[in-house]
């Protein structure tokens, strides 16, 4: 079980980097690490150069993982583990203070499922 926030951040960033490609790393800084699609698509009423997919934002007490596919495809993510559900605050933001190997694996699977869903919808 990882409890050091720097270690958790590094692990989650590695999971994010494993998704490039088909996604692109739109922002990479100490304050924000953001993934997006690579196609020009409509996001709401505006055309964007790659739909927002996910981001990591380190905070003093946790690492925030914003994951947009859980917001756009709610029904596809109803089977999250209790461990991961406890981290979900709101509709699409996970506050991660501890990271177990099983959560790590589940986050990787969650990301891949999001990519598959977005591909199916023609977003990436």
Image (cartoon, grey):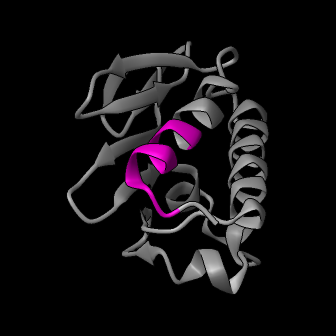
The percent coordinates of residue 62 (x first, y second) are 33, 62
User: In this rendering, would 36 be left or right of 73?
Assistant: left
The percent coordinates of residue 27 (x first, y second) are 34, 20
Please give the count of numbered marks on the rendered protein.
0
Is 119 contained in the magenta span? no
Reply above or below: 85 against 77. below
Give me the residue at 55% from left, 42% from top: 12
Quadrant that contains the C terminus: top right
Secondary structure mostly seen in the magenta stretch: helix
Give me the residue at 78% from left, 65% from top: 102
Reply above or below: 54 against 27. below
User: In this rendering, would 104 be left or right of 27?
Assistant: right
Quadrant that contains the N terminus: bottom right
Quadrant hosting residue 38: top right
The answer to whether one can see residue 47 in this image is yes
The percent coordinates of residue 58 (x first, y second) are 29, 47
The percent coordinates of residue 67 (x first, y second) are 49, 51
Bounds of the magenta span?
A: 3-11
Q: Nearer the viewer, residue 110 or 95?
A: 95
Quadrant hosting residue 42: top left
The answer to whether one can see residue 49 in this image is no
């Amino acid at each position: 079980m990882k409890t050091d926030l720097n270690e958790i951040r590094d692990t989650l960033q590695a999971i994010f980097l494993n998704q490039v490609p088909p996604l692109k790393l739109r922002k990479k800084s100490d304050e924000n690490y953001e993934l997006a699609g690579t196609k020009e698509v409509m996001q709401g009423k505006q055309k964007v150069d790659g739909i927002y997919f996910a981001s990591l934002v380190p905070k003093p007490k946790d690492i925030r993982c914003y994951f947009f596919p859980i917001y756009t495809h709610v029904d596809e993510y109803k089977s999250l583990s209790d461990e991961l559900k406890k981290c979900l605050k709101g509709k699409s933001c996970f506050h991660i203070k501890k990271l177990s190997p099983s959560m790590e694996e589940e986050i990787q699977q969650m990301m891949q499922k999001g990519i598959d869903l977005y591909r199916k919808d023609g977003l990436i």
